[in-house]
């Protein structure tokens, strides 16, 4: 098909055809249904997902088509966070999240819930109330319990994994100095898991953090805390490993060993927010290194049975969060801003295809 012909198609059809043509080159003999990440992920019993920008989902047809076609799991990038679902105290707004749930149901996708408790993206009424002393510790604990209970109950039976507690440790393994720690002490962590489990016993409950891919002080803090909480009967069930990497640094060491030590505790693991950024402009060696980083994370997950999902934090550079946060960096996703396949996409496809053949 010529480039001129592709441009003459509708935007949605063009995006899918460009992606399909490129994925066929990843294998000499692709099967009829062997051309998407989603199709291949079914075979090694791994959910492969993406974070979803719900504004783009509503407005961008190629984005919508690829979200439906390539992934069997979706995560709300922002619309399940506290500032969105409870913008004023006691007034819940599930509308944006419910639209994502409906999309997922229509396309036979599972949903990861993100996130119940975080130090960021809190509603202004909450942070200002704590700051001015009008919300004291006992009331804050009641508010937190009500929030977790309301949100988990609203989505009960429809979320397969929840990021319950997000980013609670510093790089050295000490607790992050957050509103929650200052006001409630570290017991808020166990409380959050207990309340979430009470609201939906069927959901798998996760910690979630960045820079915990390998064995280091931060991931060890999660390991030690999980072991402690499990001994106390707290329903901690998984570690979410975000996987935000940067090619200027070395690939994390001991990724598989890290997954295995959490498996030995009886916990699931999941890669929850994978992207691999670089300094712009990107060149071919940069994209090759990026592809290898994506592949190595996926390979580690596939090698450990208790690693149950692999989610990219957006799949196209068009809507990436990276340039807005890391000055001069970007190109972090598996498709470019025009939805064209990058080496990282092809590397993931090839790794999944290898796993599927091995399992046969």
Image (cartoon, grey):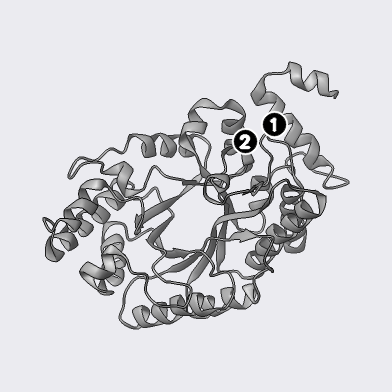
Q: Which mark is residue 210?
A: none
Pointer 2 local density, CA inside 10 Å: few below 14, some 14–19, many at least 20? many
Pointer 1 local density, CA inside 10 Å: few below 14, some 14–19, many at least 20? some
Q: Quick check: 24 above or below 59?
A: below
Contact between marks 2 and 1 (CB within 8 A): the answer is: yes
Q: Quadrant of the N terminus?
A: top right
Q: Quadrant of the C terminus?
A: bottom right
Q: Position of residue 95 (x, y in %)?
A: 33, 34
* Residue furthest front in the image: 327
Q: Residue at x 35, y 83 (%)?
A: 231
Q: Residue at x 66, y 68 (%)?
A: 300
The front one of 47 and 286 is: 286
User: Which is more N-terminal, label 1 or label 2?
Assistant: 1
Answer left or right for 13 relative to 94.
right
Q: Residue at x 73, y 45 (%)?
A: 281
| Residue linked to disc 1 | 16
Q: Quick check: 298 above or below 257?
A: above
Q: Position of residue 39 (x, y in %)?
A: 67, 46
Label 2 – label 1 distance at C-alpha: 7 Å
Q: Residue at x 52, y 67 (%)?
A: 269
User: Which element carries disc 2, helix, strand or loop?
Assistant: helix
* Residue furthest right in the image: 28
Q: Position of residue 301 (x, y in %)?
A: 63, 65
| Residue linked to disc 2 | 66
Q: Position of residue 65 (x, y in %)?
A: 60, 31
């Amino acid at each position: 098909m010529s480039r001129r012909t592709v441009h003459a198609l509708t935007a949605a059809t063009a995006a899918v055809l460009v992606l399909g043509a490129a994925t066929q080159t990843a294998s000499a003999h692709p099967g009829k249904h062997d051309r998407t990440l989603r199709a291949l992920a079914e075979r090694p019993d791994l959910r492969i997902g993406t974070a979803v920008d719900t504004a783009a989902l509503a407005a961008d047809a190629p984005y919508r088509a690829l979200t439906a076609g390539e992934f069997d799991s979706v995560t709300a990038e922002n619309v399940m966070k506290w500032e969105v679902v409870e913008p004023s105290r006691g007034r819940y707004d599930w509308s944006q999240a419910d639209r994502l749930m409906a999309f997922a149901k229509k396309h036979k996708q599972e949903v990861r819930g993100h996130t119940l408790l975080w130090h960021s993206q809190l509603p202004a009424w909450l942070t200002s109330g704590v700051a001015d002393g009008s919300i004291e510790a006992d009331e804050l604990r009641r508010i937190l319990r009500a929030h977790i209970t309301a949100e988990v109950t609203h989505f009960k039976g429809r979320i397969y994994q929840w990021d319950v507690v997000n980013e609670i440790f510093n790089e050295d393994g000490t607790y992050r100095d957050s509103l929650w720690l200052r006001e409630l002490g570290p017991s808020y962590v166990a409380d959050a898991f207990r309340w979430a489990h009470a609201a939906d016993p069927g959901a798998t409950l996760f910690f979630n953090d960045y820079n915990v891919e390998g064995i280091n002080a931060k991931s060890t803090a999660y390991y030690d805390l999980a072991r402690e909480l499990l001994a106390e009967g707290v329903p901690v069930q998984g570690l979410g490993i975000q996987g935000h990497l940067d090619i200027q640094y070395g690939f994390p060491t001991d990724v598989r060993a890290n997954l295995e030590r959490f498996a030995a505790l009886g916990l699931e693991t999941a890669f929850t927010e994978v992207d691999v950024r670089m300094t712009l402009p990107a060149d071919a060696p940069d994209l090759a290194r990026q592809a290898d980083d994506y592949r190595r994370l996926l390979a580690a997950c596939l090698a450990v049975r208790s690693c149950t999902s692999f989610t990219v934090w957006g799949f196209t550079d068009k809507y990436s969060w990276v340039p807005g946060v890391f000055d001069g960096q970007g190109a972090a996703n598996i498709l470019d801003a025009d939805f064209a396949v990058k080496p990282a996409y092809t590397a993931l496809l090839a790794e999944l295809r290898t796993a599927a053949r091995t399992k046969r």
